[in-house]
Amino acid sequence: MNRPRSLSARSGDFDVIIAGAGVIGAVMASLLLARKLSTAGRVAVVADRLMDAPPADAGWDLRVFALSRASERLLKTCGVWNSLPPARVFPYERMCVWDSAGTPQGTGSLTFDCAQIGEPNLGHIVEGRALQWQCLQSARAAGVVFIDGAVQSTVSGENDVTLRLLDGRELRGKLLVAADGTESKIRELLGIGTAGHAYHQDALVAHVQTAHSHADTAWQRFLSTGPVAFLPLNDGRSSIVWSVTRSKAALLRAMDPDAFGAELTTASGAALGQCALTTPLATFPLKLQYALEYARPRAVLLGDAAHVVHPLAGQGLNLGLLDCAALAQVLGEAGGPENFGDYKYLRRYERWRRSENLLAAAALDGLERLFSNADPLSAGLRTAGLSAVGKMPFMKRHFARRALGLAGDVPET
C-alpha cells in the first residue's frame, strides 16, 4: 500500500479541519463521513508528519493497545476493524490482577473472565502501527483530505476558523479539532491550560517470551514501585508495560537481556515462569494531565490533547475514541456543518466528556496511589478489597462492562 496522499489546499474551505494524523485524528475524520455529517473532500487532516506504510515483513510493533468493545464497534463503523491484519489482533479472554502481597488467582487477587459476563472476550490486543496505518487508509478511502504542514497560528471568526501553516498556506473551516497529542500545539494556541502531576515513573515497554503460556490472559501485578502488566500476543509472547520509578528504570535499561529477564521474573512473582526479553526496550515518562477546557468557539480537543491518564488499566486510547464518538453524536444534533462551530454544541460535548474523563482519571490515579503505598494498613485494605470484589459477581460484571465501554454515560458507537 502507498502512503496516504497529501494534498495542497489553496482555497482551504472545509467543514472540519483536524490537527493530528494519529489514531484519534484519523478516526474522527472517518467518523464524520461514516455518520454522513460531512462529505468527501470537506474534512481535512493536517499533520507535519504522515506515517509510511509498515514493512510487509515487520514484526510486532512495541506499541500495542488493549481495545474495548466500544472501541471495536467504533472502528467497525469507520471501516477500520475488518481491514486490520488478523495477525496483529488478538482477543484475550481473562484478566488477572493481584497485589504483591497476594498470589495470582489466590488471596489478594481479582480475576475477570469473559464467560462470566456473557461476552466473547474482554477486548483485543492490537498492534499500534497496524492500527494507525489502517485508520489513515480508511480515512483516505472515505475521501478525507490529508495536508502535510506544521501549524503556525489559528484565528476563530464569527463564521469560520482559519488555520495558518508555517509555509504560509491558510485553511478555513467551520470547526477545528485538536487531536495532536499530549503536547498539543492547537491547545497552546487556543490558550487552554492543563493541570495534573508527574508520577515520577517511566513505563518500560518490550515483548517477552515466558516459560508458561499466557493462557489468553492479561496479567497485572501491583508493586510499591508501580504495576507490571503482561498483555498476550498471538505468537505466544507477551507485551509488557512495567511502570517503575525513574531511578529503577535507569538501572533496568542498563542491564543485559538476561539480567533484565531475571528482574522481570521476580517483579511478576514468576506468575508466567522465567521471562526472556525478545525485543529492545522502549521507555516513556508517565503523568496525569487534563485540559482545563475542552472547547472554545469553533475549536475542540480530543484524546491526548484533552487528557492523559496512567496506563495501568490500558484505557487511554479507549477514552479518546469515546471522545470521537461523543463529538460525532453532538455534531449530529447541530443541524449541519454551518453549525459545527456553535459553542453551545461544543460545550455540550465538553460537559459530557470532561466529566467522564475526569472520573476515569481520578479512579486510575487513586488506584496507583493505593497500590504504590507500602504501609501495612494499605496492604491489608488492598487484599481485603480485591478479595471482596472477587466474591461479588455483580460488582465484577459492572467493572468489566465499564472497562469494555458498555456501561456508564457512553456515546453511540
Image (tube, helix red, strand yellow):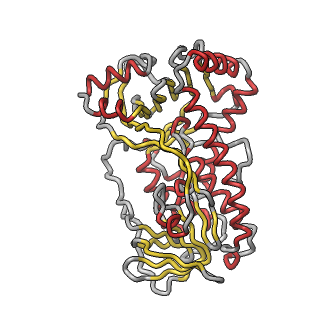
Placement of 120 over or under 293, stated as above or below: above
Image coordinates for residue 140, horizontal then vertical, percent: 48, 67
Instruction: Please tell me how many numbered marks the rendered image carries.
Output: 0
**What residue is drawn where x is 34% and y is 22%?**
263
* Quarter of the image that includes the N terminus: bottom left
From the viewer's perspective, tell me whether residue 313 is left or right of residue 54.
right
Residue 94, position in %: x, y? 57, 27
Nearer to me, 35 or 186: 186
Residue drawn at point x = 40 percent, y = 71 percent: 150
Q: Nearer the viewer, residue 292 or 79?
A: 292
- Location of residue 111 (image quadrant): top right
Determine the residue located farthest toward the bottom in the rendered image: 11
Above/below status of 92 relative to 188: above
Say whether residue 141 is visible: no
**Left or right: 377 in relation to 199:** right
Q: Tell me residue 162's x, y (percent).
A: 53, 80
Of 193 and 252, the residue lying toward us: 193
**Residue 175 can be seen in this image:** yes
Q: Is residue 303 above or below residue 35?
A: above
| Relative image position of residue 278 (x, y in whole percent) | 30, 32
Instruction: Kindly identify the residue that appears in the image at 36 percent across and 41 percent down.
Output: 283
